[in-house]
Amino acid sequence: MKPRHLILGLQHAVAMFGATVLVPLLTGLNPAVALFTAGLGTLVFHLVTGRMVPVFLGSSFAFIAPILAAKEAGFSMAAVGGGIVAAGLVYALFALLVLLIGSERVRQVFPPVVTGPVIVVIGLTLAPVAVQMASKDWLLAAFTFLSAVGSAVFLRGLYRMIPVLLGVGAGYLLALLLGRVDLAPLKEAAWLGLPSFTLATWEWGAVLLIAPVAFVTVMEHIGDILTNGRVVGKDFFAKPGLHRTLLGDGLATSLAGVLGGPANTTYSENTGVLAVTKVYDPLVLRIAALFAILLSFSPKLAALLQTLPQGVLGGIAMLLFGMIASIGIRTLAEAEIDFTHSRNLIVVSAILVLGLGGVVAELGKVQVAGAAVPLKVSGMALAALVGVVLNLFLPKRLEPEGLATEEERLP
């Protein structure tokens, strides 16, 4: 390990920090535990996948609503942890299913005409989050964004590899000079402290509220792994295999639930860092995981990152999330998708409209703790599902007469 690996790892830790601690802050879970389980879960994922997939696992936003619903239904945080453990087991079941049917069949279900627009949706659905943070202070956001872009384009060597860190650092320095940083949390925080772990308990009501969300996030996982592979230029469906990435994500989520942390998911923020820096070494992500664990035991260091102004975080998020959407467009371009084919237009347009339009499909209701709880599929998961179905069932020759199909043009 070289000193530059530490700097690159710190950059990934900065990228994941805001979202990872936001989920526990919104749900009542412990932020320090979230950091610890994110770091530990990332290390578990890398172990399961043979240390070859450059992924960081952080707190999943998809579980915010069911966690809040479980709390409103009167379940304890320990019972919420049990529901998250069960969600991880759902991942493991899907991993077994993929192992039995083979990754190649899964790949056939997700050709570029589906994965490209799904990746675009992943990036663009995060765009409002970036804009909302940036709108808190557009001056800081613009300065941070331009600093990161300038670092990536004009600098050389190591400095070109850490545009996110340099952009955030420049934005933070400007915020300090302008007096826009609240240092009170930093002064009050202790240097060392143990995370307040909460051991999970199994209560079927909480399990039925929380675990079904995993059926949706599995679709997100597939999209994220495809995106990560497109960025890196490797086929992670083939090696280490989708079944291993699903199992790694599931074990990380179950482990987080056991200790009282939020469910984990592959982070688009860190995939965006990979796209910007073009440094794909998985070791860097494992170093970021160690930084996350270190932060969980040091309230002082965690508080330092918490003092980052929203404008600074928004400026860097604009770059990272935009990079994700751009990768989706590149996926379509490199696959040479022919948009004179009506079926291709239909598949892509359906995914974009459903994914970006906020459509919600209610699948029914289940009785939990005497209350009817709706089961819903929305956003990217719904878009991906519809895209898959359309691609499978629309006729391959649904195009204007006289135009050659993609199969006919191939040698």
Image: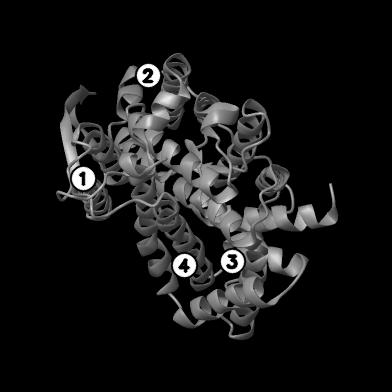
In x, y percent, where is residue 198? 54, 30
Which residue is painted at 60% across and 44% down in the image?
A: 35
| Tag 1 residue | 343
Mark 2 vs 4, N-terminal side: 2
| Tag 4 residue | 318
Mark 2 vs 1, N-terminal side: 2
Q: CA distance from mark 2 to mark 4?
A: 40 Å
In the displayed structure image, the side of residue 264 where residue 166 appears, left or right: right
Identify the element where label 2 is drawn: loop
- Give the label, 1 or 4, closer to the camera: 1
Which residue is painted at 26% across and 41% down in the image?
A: 387
Q: CA distance from mark 4 to mark 3?
A: 19 Å
- Give the label, 4 or 3, closer to the camera: 4
**CB of mark 2 within 8 Å of CB of mark 1?**
no
Mark number for residue 203? 2
Mark 4 vs 3, N-terminal side: 3
Mark number for residue 307? 3
- Give the label, 2 or 1, closer to the camera: 1
Q: CA distance from mark 2 to mark 1?
A: 46 Å
Q: CA distance from mark 3 to mark 1?
A: 49 Å
* Residue in the foreground of this view, choosing between 401 and 167: 401
Indicate the quadrant where residue 374 lies: top left
Identify the element where label 4 is drawn: helix
Q: Amino acid at mark 2?
A: Glu
The vertical placement of 5 against 48, above or below, is: below
Category of crowding for the residue at label 4, using alpha-carbon neighbours closer than 10 angstroms: few (below 14), some (14–19), many (at least 20): many
* Residue in the foreground of this view, choosing between 105 and 278: 105
Q: CA distance from mark 1 to mark 4?
A: 32 Å
Indicate the quadrant where residue 276 lies: bottom right
In x, y percent, where is residue 309? 53, 70
Mark 2 vs 3, N-terminal side: 2
Q: Amino acid at mark 3?
A: Thr
